[in-house]
Amino acid sequence: MALTTLDPNTALIIVDLQKGIVASPFIHPIAGVVDRSRALLDAFRERGLPVVLVKVVGVAQGRTERPRHGGSFPEGWTDFIPELDQQPSDLVVAKRTWGAFANTDLKDQLTALDVTQVVIIGVATGTGVESTARQAYEHGFNVTLALDAMTDARSETHDHSSRHVFPKLGETGTAQEVIDLLAIRGT
């Protein structure tokens, strides 16, 4: 579904733009994703709208057939990239699962701020972004996804999420379209 509107109290959620992850190979140049993410970040901050920075700091407990990470990441791996220019007003979520809402207090923080809609961007499209979008939808938030401000390691994963999953969860468009809607709202 194309972008039509943004609620008066919309939050931006940036998923996993952290030093250890952005060094990974992606199907879209990460510099463009970061630039568009920064443009959205600036637009939300200028309007005093909530910004959520999400980072993965470990793995979920429980059985998995995949080999687990050794338990700790190298120094600086979990740090946000400097382009995000983390501010004291930013909400920070440290997660151990793909989605930003599972086993965190993100829903409660957003509800306390009267947020009714979220714009979700980041990496990777088919894991962190999609899981966060699904969880936001399940918690009753209106969901918007800026497709050009996300990427994945595999094109088929990115394409599947973008074409088949995201339109069922909310509206999709570009970072500039979100920024334009913010400007129209006059906030």
Image (spheres, rainbow, N blue to C red):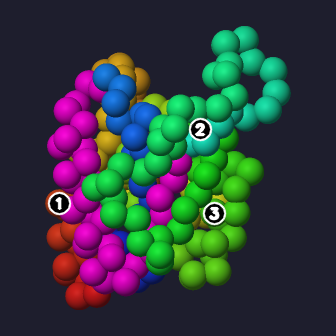
Res 120 → quadrant: bottom left
Mark 1 lies on residue: 176
Q: Nearer the viewer, residue 153 or 91?
A: 91
Kindly identify the residue that appears in the image at 22 percent across and 68 percent down. 179
Across and down, in percent, residue 54 comes to 51, 53
Please identify the residue farthest to the bottom as the structure is shown.
186
Identify the disc placed on residue 98.
Answer: 2
The kind of residue on which mark 1 rests is: Gln
86 on left or right of 83: right
| Above or below for 69 versus 110 | above
List x then y, in percent, for residue 1: 33, 51
Residues at marks 1 and 2 touching, judged by CB atoms closer than 8 Å = no
Q: Nearer the viewer, mark 3 or mark 1?
A: 3
Instruction: Answer with mark 1 or mark 2, whichever residue precedes in sequence.
Output: 2
Q: Is residue 16 left or right of residue 187?
A: right
* Mark 3 Cα shell of 10 Å, populated few (<14), some (14-19), many (≥20): some
Q: Is residue 183 above or below residue 67?
A: below
Q: Residue drawn 53% across and 76% down?
A: 115
Q: CA distance from mark 3 to mark 2?
A: 14 Å
Residue pictured at 32% horizontal, 42% vertical = 150
Amino acid beneath label 3 = Leu
Indicate yes or no whether the magenta region holds residue 122.
no
Residue 23 position by quadrant: top left
> Real-space Cα distance between discs 3 and 1?
26 Å
Q: From the top left corner, tell me how far across and down residue 31 is, in percent.
A: 20, 41
Q: Which residues are magenta?
A: 26-55
* Residue 5: mark: none
Is label 1 or label 2 in front?
Answer: 2
Q: Which residue is mark 3?
A: 106
The answer to whether residue 134 is left or right of residue 183 is right
Image spot of residue 122 (x, y percent):
38, 46
Residues under labels 1 and 2: Cα distance? Answer: 26 Å
